[in-house]
Image (cartoon, rainbow, N blue to C red):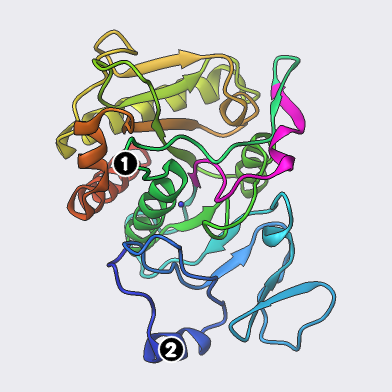
Amino acid sequence: MPRSARVLGATALAAALTSALTAFPPPADANAPAATRPTSVAQTPVARRTPPTASVHTTRHLTVARGPHAVPSTGGLRLAPLARGPLTGRTIVVDPGHNGRRSRVNDRLVPAGGGRTKPCNTSGTASRSGASEHAFTWNLANRTATELRRRGATVVLTRPNDRGVGPCVDERAAIGNRARADLVLSIHADGNTSRRARGFHIITSTRMTGGPAAQRASTRYAMRVRTAFARTGMPRSTYLGRGTALTPRTDIAGLNLSRRPAIMLEAGNMRHPTDAALLAKPSFRAKAARLLADATQQTLRR
């Protein structure tokens, strides 16, 4: 799902209003600055400064397409590049895992690939101190999105804020497919209750809609992310991946249904106190965002 812990002030907001795109509401996590200048993937054009109508949702005198704010949300939000750079012309989908809140919609069954179904989504796990996974993923996703945009990438966030419901897991894959994303990065944190379970791992699918080519590209991306993320100070998983920190699976809908190269990062185990303390640090999140952007850039190097 950033640049600093400061929310856009009046001056920055006024500057953003002069651009052709608009901003969406700032994240609830105090450490996460608001992402700027998004538009909807689902509807084009979007976010024009026009009077509100039945087809738009108005927030802070700005208008954005209704789809991202539906229940469950759909379409994602497209963030324009902040500069030209090595990722100019590339589109990266960054998926802040889970929902900002619990809803009955979560229980609705949706396709998960391979003939399976799964519940729409959940709000994720939480640390023993009560820090939520959905707030962590929203914060790190926004930080990562900013790093990528500074390098020239167009970034699509799958959800617009940390207060809503959705998208469902099948829609998250569809967002990447519709955007024809070069890469899809889904950010999560695990909730294993074993006292010995700690560390990060990266999930790939062995049953992707995109077939063997997408699976091979996903594995290459996973290996780049593994090398980079090890430099955050978070160790490789002690309980999944058998020391490799790579976990191939067939039950992750967002990966199974993807036609684009896609991986899921479990950034650490929120139920382990050492991991949880590290995940909570703004310095860790800032470094993780830079390293994830590095790995993405390296994977797409021409």
Residue 283 x %, y %: 18, 53
Q: Is residue 159 above or below residue 13?
A: above
Q: Residue furthest right?
A: 54
Using the rendered image of the protein, determine whether residue 69 is visible from the camera's viewpoint: yes
Quadrant where the image shows the C terminus: top left
- Could you tell me which residue is drawn at 76 percent across and 28 percent down? 109
Numbered disc 1: secondary structure: loop
Labels 2, 1: front one: 1
The reply, left or right, for residue 11 in relation to residue 65 is: left
Is-magenta flag for residue 243?
A: no
Q: Name which quarter of the figure residue 118 lies in.
A: top right
- Could you tell me which residue is drawn at 56 percent across and 28 percent down? 255
Measure how far apart labels 2 and 1 are at the Cα level: 38 Å
- Could you tell me which residue is drawn at 36 percent across and 70 percent down? 83
Q: Looking at the image, how many numbered discs can be counted on the residues?
A: 2
Q: Name which quarter of the figure residue 24 lies in.
A: bottom right
Q: Which residue is mark 1?
A: 129
Which residue range is magenta in the image?
95-112
Q: Disc 2 vs disc 1: Cβ atoms closer than 8 Å?
A: no
Residue closest to the eye, 253 or 89: 253
Q: Amino acid at mark 2?
A: Ala
Mark 2 or mark 1: whose residue is earlier in sequence: 2
Residue 286 x %, y %: 23, 54
The reply, left or right, for residue 44 in relation to residue 263 is: right
Residue closest to the eye, 123 or 70: 123
User: Badge 2: few (under 14), some or many (20 or more) residues near its Cα, within 10 Å?
Assistant: few
Q: Is residue 199 above or below residue 16?
A: above
Q: Which residue is mark 2?
A: 15
Residue 214 x %, y %: 54, 25
